[in-house]
Structures are given as C-alpha cells and as structure tokens.
Image (tube, rainbow, N blue to C red):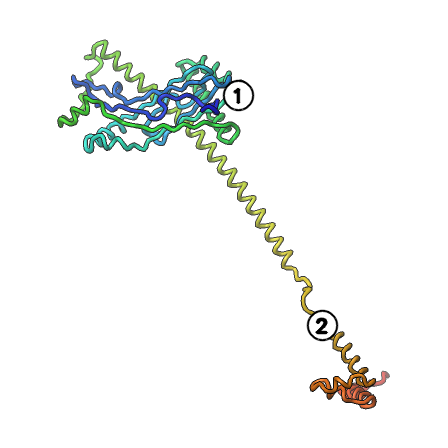
Amino acid sequence: MADTPYALEISPDSTLQFTLTRGTANDGRSTVGESTPRCTMSLRHPGKTKEHLAFKVKTTQPRRYLVRPNQGVVAPGTTEKVTILLVEKDKQILLQSYDRLGQTALDHSKDKFLVQSCTTPDDFASRYMSAKADSTDDSEGNRATKELAESLTTMWNSAAGGDLPIYNKKLHVHHVVSPSDSASAKGGNAPQPLEEKPSMENMSPDQIYAEVSSLRRKYDELVSFSVNLTAERDILNNTLEQTKRDLNRETMAKVALENKGLIGARSKGVPKQSSRGFSLFSVIFVALTFTLLGIKGATSGVADILIEIPVIGPFLDLGPNEVAVEVADEVADEVSSVNIAPVEPEL
C-alpha cells in the first residue's frame, strides 16, 4: 500500500466475522430484527493523496448479504462505515448446519468480499458530496440517492475500462454462534417456535415503539436492497452492451481477415509460367540445332569419332549425297501424303 495512494485502509483487514444468535429471547419474545447478524467495516482515507477516493463493495453471495452502502466516496482524512447484514433465511440455514455438525460446519465458509477503491475527479467528487449532503428521507431524497448510485455506477464502469487504476482488497468470512446459543444447542434445547404477535390494541407504548422501529429497519433494508439491485442491474446492462460491442468488433475483424485471405488465395491461384523446366520451343530449337550440327559434322568429316557411337553412328555414317537424298525422300513422302482436291473452274 505504500505505492498505492488510491488504496483505502480497511478494518478489519482480513476477515469479517458474523455472530449467529437465535431468533427468540429468554422470555419468548421475538428478536428477529435485533438478532440479525451484522458486521461493520471501516474504510479510512489515508490522506496520501488530496483526491477523493471512491469505493465499491462486492461479494460472492449477493443474495445472502445486504451491504449498506455498497459504494460511495470518501474525502481525504475521513472514514466511511459500511454495514453488512446476513439475511435471516441464510442465518437459519447456518444454524441448522451448526446443530447437525457443530462449529466445523461453519469454519470452511467460501463466502468472500472484495473492496475496490480508486481516485475520482474533483468535479465529480464535489458534485457527489454536495448531493449527498442535500439528500433527505423523503421522495426527493430517495430520487437523489438513486441518481448518486447511477452516477457512481457510470464512474465505476469507466474505471473498469482501464481509465483509472483500481486497488482490490479481498476479505474472508467467518461465522460463529454466540456462546449462549451454543450452550443451548449442546444441551439439546431446540429453539421455541415463534409466538403470534399481539394485536396493536394489546400492546404497550414501548412494544408499539419497538415494533415501529423494527418495521422501520426492515423498510430501510428493503430500500437499500432495491438500490443495490438497481445498481447491479445497471452494471450488468453496461457489461452486456460492452460484451456485444466487443463481439461485433471481433466478428468484423474476423470477416475482414477471411476476405483478405480469400483475395490472397485467389491471387495466388492465378497460374504463372513456371521458371523451372524447359518450354516446348526450347526443346525443338535445341533438337534442330544439334541435328544441323550433326549433319554439318557428318558432311565435313569432323564427326568421324561420333560414328563409333552405337545410336548416333549410323545416322552420321552418310555421305553428302546420301544425306541430300534422304532429306529429299522424306520431303517427297510428306508431300505425296497430302491429298489435294482438284479445283473446278467457276462458270
């Protein structure tokens, strides 16, 4: 991290621990909202750069955990708190595994979190921080929160394209059962079924306040979950569009290469006059040349030595008159073999 001024200081730095508790208190009162396993993570700007740092929290189990907030911007020298909640359904599944196999069933969790951070432009950081400060709990505030999430999603898409360096920090997950629930499970005491909640008329003011607070927390969780789903949907849509564009570019490049190879193959398929071997004209010319030289040598008496050769000797063993007679006879035979039709006079 010494060479990465855009890295946030994360606490805890290696493992996120979730403590699992049963959904009922000792008096039989439901404590589902209060016993939700949660873990708080601190993201501190180390101050190594004057720029704001954006962060994003990802997990391998997005349906199991609720992260609030899952992305944001941290000013220099400040700290941002991130709360991670374990869904009640998955908590019950983990408790059932613990009841069957003990702590060993929870010690080998494959759940992981990834915290990413990078620098943000000053204009974007100022707009984000001002919009965050102006956001409220009404509909206008929810709309502003949605716009902030969309702007951050767009910024992260540009950063993922390689425009900005990104620091990645992986965190493991560890689940443990609270000591009281562990002792009750070992003692063979099964969890009591949830009792029906009394009606509003039979509730005391404190119970009504607790119920409203629980509903408020659940509403906040649902809003946060919907915002997270919208952000993830936008990321998936942008990733899909980018993948389509890359696929189209690769397809066009492949077609262009295939067309280029086809044109090259056609140009290579044009027959060219081979430079190897001899043409028919060269063979005839050489044959006539040697024939004339042989005749001349035979008539001048220079080729007496060649007469001794078995194949060429009989041909060269001819006198000047005999050669002339042989040539004349061959010409006469060729002329006599041609049938010339008589030409009738025109009337």
The amino acid type, in three-letter code, at marker 2 is Leu
Residue occupied by mark 1: 121
Q: Where in the figure is residue 284, as x and y percent of width and height?
A: 74, 75
**Is the residue 213 above or below the residue 299 in the image?**
above
Q: Quadrant of the C terminus?
A: bottom right
Q: Inspect this view and state whether residue 33 appears.
A: yes
Label ID, residue 221: none
Residue drawn at the location 41% of the way across and 21% of the way down: 9
The residue beneath circle 2 is: 280
Say whether residue 197 is left or right of residue 232.
left
Judge whether 78 appears above or below 67 on screen. above
Task: Identify the residue shown where x is 56% and y is 44%.
Answer: 253
Mark 2, Cα crowd under 10 Å, few <14 / some 14-19 / many 20+, is few
Image quadrant holding the N terminus, namely: top left
Question: In the rendered view, does 251 fall on the left or right side of 115?
Answer: right
Tell me where residue 169 sits by quadrant.
top left
Amino acid type of the residue that numbered disc 1 sits on in the rendered structure: Pro
The spot of residue 74 in percent (x, y) is 45, 18
The residue shown at (61%, 50%) is: 260
Q: Are marks 2 and 1 in contact (CB under 8 Å)?
A: no
Residue farthest along the top direction in this orientation: 205
Q: Quadrant of residue 12?
A: top left
- The structure residue drawn at horizontal position 74% and vertical position 84%, both measured from the top left corner, is 306
Vertical comparison of 104 with 135: above or below: below
Describe the element under mark 2 as helix, strand or loop: helix
**Of residues 267 and 43, which is closer to you in this image?**
43
Q: Residues within 10 Å of mark 1 (few under 14, many from 20)?
A: few
Q: CA distance from mark 2 to mark 1?
A: 80 Å
| Camera sees residue 336 | no
Q: Of all residues shown, which one is farthest toward the front?
A: 305
Dot 1 lies on which element?
loop
Does residue 202 lie above or below 312 as drawn? above
